Amino acid sequence: AMPLNSQTLSHFFRHSMALSAWKTAGPSTWSLRVNPSSGNLHPTEAYALLPRVEADSSMDTDDAGFALDPGVYHYSPYLHALERLQAFEHGSTNATSTCMPGSPNVRDGLLASPAGSPPGFRFFVALTSIYWREAWKYGTRAFRYCQHDTGHALMALWISARTLGWDLRLLPCQSDASIEEVL
């Protein structure tokens, strides 16, 4: 399994949630992504709850990437970047500390890790849907399509994790309220 560092994290998101191409027809231009979506509307957003992530020390300094501090990050497909939403320290007493990878309270969410990895390697991925991206076009069917698109995103994340030798598991017991509190 590949170690968690800025390069492997970039690979994980590039091959699951990123933009893959741009199309143009007449005056219109739009993006395509690596995972499918109903009507190419992409209501699914990805977030990562990360421990400290180091730059890839095996690469030249120009290509090594950069370190990330522990926190909650939103993945931006357009920028292919993680946007830090909240920083937190492992072991702090605020609400996010119970979701920090390695916490004894963590039981739920999407857990990414290679088999036999040390506890600090694990990180969590959360998927959300922006309902209006589908609702304007599909009306009452939008909820169903959002669920469908989340399934596509989940499988794309799983395939990307497997290319790195990582395991991605769904841990479905987390309540919507606790996920909302963290994100």
Image (tube, helix red, strand yellow):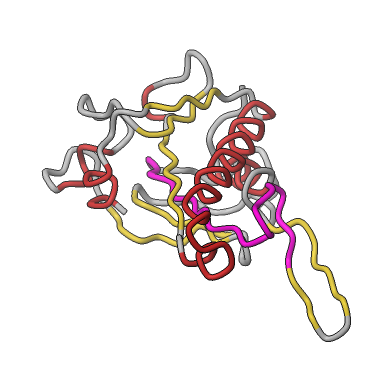
Q: How many marks?
A: 0
Q: Residue furthest bottom?
A: 27
Report the quarter where the C terminus lies: bottom left
**Residue 15 sits in which quadrant?**
top right
Q: Is residue 4 magenta?
A: no
Q: State left or right for residue 13 relative to residue 27.
A: left
Q: Residue at x 85, y 74 (%)?
A: 24
Find the magenta span and give its range. 31-51
Report the quarter where the N terminus lies: top right
Residue 105 versus residue 18 in the image, above or below:
above
Q: Residue furthest left?
A: 93
Q: Residue furthest front?
A: 140
Q: Residue at x 46, y 43 (%)?
A: 53
Residue 132 versus residue 26 in the image, above or below:
above
Q: Is residue 41 magenta?
A: yes
Q: Residue furthest right?
A: 26
Q: x, y percentage for residue 118?
A: 41, 20
Q: x, y percentage for residue 78?
A: 63, 66
Q: Residue at x 29, y 45 (%)?
A: 179
Q: Residue at x 56, y 60 (%)?
A: 81
Q: x, y percentage for residue 83?
A: 46, 62
Q: Nearer the viewer, residue 38 or 76?
A: 38
Q: x, y percentage for residue 48?
A: 43, 46
Q: Nearer the viewer, residue 166 or 21?
A: 21
Q: Nearer the viewer, residue 166 or 135?
A: 135
